[in-house]
Amino acid sequence: MPKQTVRDLKLDGLKVLVRVDFNVPQGKDGSISDDRRIKAALPTLTHALNHGASLILVSHLGRPTGDPGTDAPFRLDAVAARLSALLGKPVAKVDDTVGPAAKAACAALRPGEIVVLENVRFNKGEKKGDPKFAAELAGLADAYVNDAFGTCHRDEASMVAVPECFPPERRALGFLVEKELKILETLLGDAKRPMVSVMGGAKVSDKILIIENLLPKVDHLLVGGAMTYTFLKAQGHEIGKSRCEGDKLDEARKLMSLAGLKLVLPVDHLIATAPEATAEVKVVEGPNIPEGWFGMDIGQKTIELYSGMIRTAGTVVWNGPMGKFEDAPFRDGTLGVAKALAASTGVTVVGGGETAEAVETFGFAAKVTHVSTGGGAFLEYLEGKAFNSLRVIPDREG
Ligand code: ADP
Ligand code: 3PG
Ligand code: MG
C-alpha cells in the first residue's frame, strides 16, 4: 500500500518540518565534496514552497560527539549556503535545533521562507529517540515530511518520535523517499528478467543477509571484490594474502549451496604484491592466488563475462566495488561493471556508499536508472528489514 506523500498534504500556510539527509561527504577542510543528497531533496522542497508552505529543515551531518563549539565541521552552515545557491533564494540558518534561536526563527517564518536548524545530532535526545526532545522539535511545526531516505534505517528522534507527535494526516513522505522505495520494491517484487545482482565490496559478512534475501529473486549473482576470497577459501582454494573472513567460511559454504549455479565467481584476478598502488601487479586465471600475493580486482576475462550478463539483463542491482577501485591499478573491474550497467537497456540500480561514489566518479550516474542516495538504508531495505521511520507514516487513503 503506498504511503501518504507531500502531494497529499494541505500545505497552504503550514510550517512544514522536513527531515532531510544532508549528511554529505566533506573534504578535510569541511567543504562539501558531493552535493547529490542536497539536490535530491529539491523536488520536495520546491513543491512545498510552491504550495504556500514554509520550511523548517532538519538534518544530521556526520557523527558529532561534542557540541557545536568543539565540533564546528559538523555545523550545517555550508549545507544551508549550498541549498540557497541551488534554490536561488535565501535560506536562513540558526545555530541551535530547539533552543531560543530556532524557536524565534520558526515563529517568525512566513510562507515561502526556509530555515535550516543546526545539526540535529548535537542534541543528545536525537540518537536516544527521546520523546521530550521530539516533542520540542515537533512543536516548531504544523506538519512533518520525511525525505531523508539515507537515514530511514535509523530510529533516531527526528525519524520516528517526531512524526509520532503529529496527527496522521499531517505526516508524509517526500518525493525522494517515495522514488527510492518504488525502485527498491521493483527489485524485491516483480523485476524484469533476467535479473542480475552484482555483489562486491569489502566483507561478505556485510552482505550475507542481502544475498539470502535476493537469491530467490535473481537469476544470476555475480561476485567480485574482497568477498570473493572468502568464497574461494571456503571452496578449498589457495587465496595467498587476499582479504578473507576466516570466521565466515561456513556461512559462505551455506550461501554457495543455497545459490547453486546462480552464484558466479571470478574466472581471473588482478593480483598484487601489496594492497597498494605502487605494488607489482599481474593477472592469474583460475581460482587460486599464488602464495604471498593479494587479490585486488577481477581480471579482464571476468570483466567480459560479467559485462555480457549485465548488458543483456532485464534488471541489474549492483552493490559493492569489484576491487580496491580507489587506487588506479585496481580500478578496471569496477569501471568495467559501471560501463556495462551504463550500456544496459534494462533497469539498472546502484546502491551503497562506495559503489555510488565509484559510479559518480566515473561519470556514469546519469546513464543508470537509479543511483540510490542511501548507503546503509539501501542495504538494509534489500535485506528485507522493516523501518520504523516508514511505519509511522500512514498509508494513502483510497
Ligand atoms: P559499499 O559501500 O558500496 O556497500 P563496501 O563498503 O562493501 O561497499 O566495500 C567498499 C570497499 O571495498 C572499497 O573501499 C574497496 O576499496 C574495498 N575492496 C573491494 N575489493 C577489494 C579487494 N579485492 N581488496 C581490498 N579491498 C577491496
Ligand atoms: C548515511 O550516510 O548512511 C546516513 O546519512 C546515515 O548516517 P549514519 O550512518 O551516521 O547514521
Ligand atoms: Mg561502504
Image: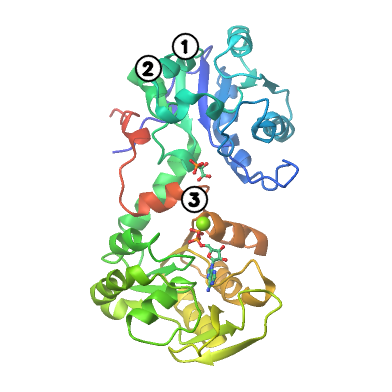
Secondary structure, mark 3, is loop
- The amino acid pointed to by label 1 is Gly
| Residue 228 in the image, given as x and y percentages of width and height | 43, 76
Question: Is residue 356 something that shows in the picture?
Answer: yes
Secondary structure, mark 1, is loop
Residue 149 versus residue 88: which sits nearer the camera?
149
- The amino acid pointed to by label 3 is Gly
Q: Which mark is residue 375?
A: 3
First in residue order: circle 2 vs circle 1: 1
Q: Which mark is residue 318?
A: none
Query: Residue shown at 57%/36% (left/top)?
Result: 41
Task: Tell me which corner region of the image, top left, top right, bottom left or bottom right, holds residue 5.
Answer: top left
Q: Is residue 249 left or right of residue 33?
A: left
Q: Is residue 357 above or below residue 49?
A: below
Question: Ligand 2 near label 3 (Cβ, under 8 Å)?
Answer: yes
Mark 1 Cα shell of 10 Å, populated few (<14), some (14-19), many (≥20): some
Task: Tell me which corner region of the image, top left, top right, bottom left or bottom right, holds residue 181.
Answer: top left
Q: Which residue is mark 2?
A: 165
Mark 3 Cα shell of 10 Å, populated few (<14), some (14-19), many (≥20): some
Q: Is residue 278 left or right of residue 256?
A: right
| Residue 196 in the image, given as x and y percentages of width and height | 39, 70
Secondary structure, mark 2, is loop
Question: Is residue 298 something that shows in the picture?
Answer: no
